[in-house]
Image: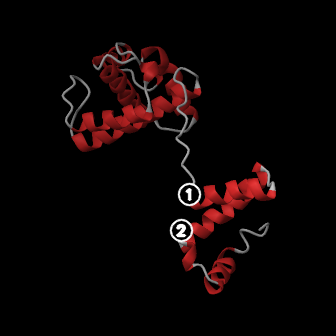
C-alpha cells in the first residue's frame, strides 16, 4: 500500500527501514479510506516513521507510545537533526510530523497494537461530592439519580461559583431561565 502513494524507491526504503514499517501499509489504507490525498498521506507516513525511529533512539518500543510521547516528539521536531526526516521549513515539517505521529498512534490504538490510555477522570468539586454523599446517607438516593443531579449541579457551580453564600433566589432564577430548557428533567 505504501507504493500507491509514492514510487520513489529511496523514500520507500527509508520508510520501510523504521520500526513503524510493519504497520505502515495498514496506516496508509486507513488514511486513503479517510479521504486524504497522496501528498498528505506521504507527509503523515513520514511523521509516523520519524516518530517510530525517535522512540527507538530513546530505547522505547512503539507499543509503549502514548499521547505524552507525541507531545515530546513535537518538541523534538522543532530542533530535529535526524537524517532524512527534517526538510525545508522546520515549522511546517514539525507540525506535519507531529500530526502524522498522532494519527499513527490513534491507528495503532484502533488496531490494538497500543493500549488505549484511560483519560484521567476529573475530580468533582468538593461541594458536589459532599452533596452526593449527603443525599446517599440521608435520602437513600441511588448513583444513577445522582449522576443526573450532578450534571445540573455542575452547571450551577460553573455559572454561580462554588460559594453557596452567594446563591440567592435572583441568581438561581437567572440560572434556571438561561439553562431551563437544557435541564428540563431537573
- Within 10 angstroms of label 2, few (less than 14), some, or many (20 or more) residues? some
Judged left or right of residue 77, residue 185 is right
* Quarter holding residue 59: top left
User: Is residue 1 in view?
Assistant: no
Image point 68% across, 65% down: which residue? 152
Percent of width and height locating residue 169: 66, 84
Please name the residue that numbered disc 2 is placed on.
162
Front-most of 139 and 61? 139
Q: Earlier in the sequence, mark 2 or mark 1?
A: 1
Percent of width and height locating residue 146: 73, 55
Q: Where is the C terminus found, in terms of image quarters?
A: bottom right
Of helix, strand and loop, which one carries label 1?
helix
Outermost residue on the front side: it is 138
Image point 55% across, 50% down: which residue? 123
Mark seen at residue 45: none
- Proximity of marks 2 and 1: CB atoms separated by less than 8 Å: yes
Distance from Cα at disc 2 to Cα at disc 1: 9 Å
* Quarter holding residue 180: bottom right
Front-most of 157 and 21? 157
- Asked if 99 appears above or below 19 in the picture, the reply is below
- Asked if 108 appears above or below 34 in the picture, the reply is above
Please name the residue that numbered disc 1 is placed on.
126
Percent of width and height locating residue 159: 56, 72
Amino acid at each position: 500500500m505504501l507504493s500507491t502513494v509514492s514510487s520513489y524507491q529511496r523514500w520507500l526504503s527509508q520508510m520501510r527501514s523504521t520500526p513503524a514499517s510493519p504497520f505502515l501499509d495498514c496506516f496508509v489504507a486507513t488514511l486513503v479510506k479517510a479521504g486524504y490525498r497522496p501528498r498528505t498521506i506521504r507527509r503523515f507516513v513520514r511523521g509516523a516513521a520519524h516518530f517510530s525511529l525517535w522512540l527507538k533512539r530513546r530505547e522505547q518500543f512503539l507499543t509503549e507510545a502514548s499521547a505524552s510521547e507525541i507531545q515530546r516528539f513535537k518538541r523534538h521536531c522543532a530542533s530535529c537533526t535526524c537524517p532524512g526526516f527534517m526538510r525545508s521549513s522546520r515549522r511546517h515539517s514539525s507540525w506535519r510530523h507531529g500530526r502524522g505521529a498522532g494519527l499513527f498512534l490513534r491507528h495503532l490504538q484502533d488496531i490494538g497494537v497500543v493500549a488505549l490510555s484511560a483519560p484521567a477522570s476529573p475530580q468533582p468539586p468538593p461541594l458536589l461530592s459532599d452533596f452526593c454523599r449527603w443525599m446517599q446517607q440521608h435520602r437513600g438516593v441511588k448513583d444513577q439519580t445522582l449522576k443526573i443531579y450532578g450534571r445540573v449541579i455542575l452547571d450551577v457551580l460553573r455559572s454561580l461559583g462554588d460559594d453557596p453564600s452567594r446563591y440567592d433566589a435572583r441568581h438561581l432564577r437567572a440560572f434556571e431561565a438561561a439553562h431551563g430548557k437544557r435541564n428540563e428533567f431537573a
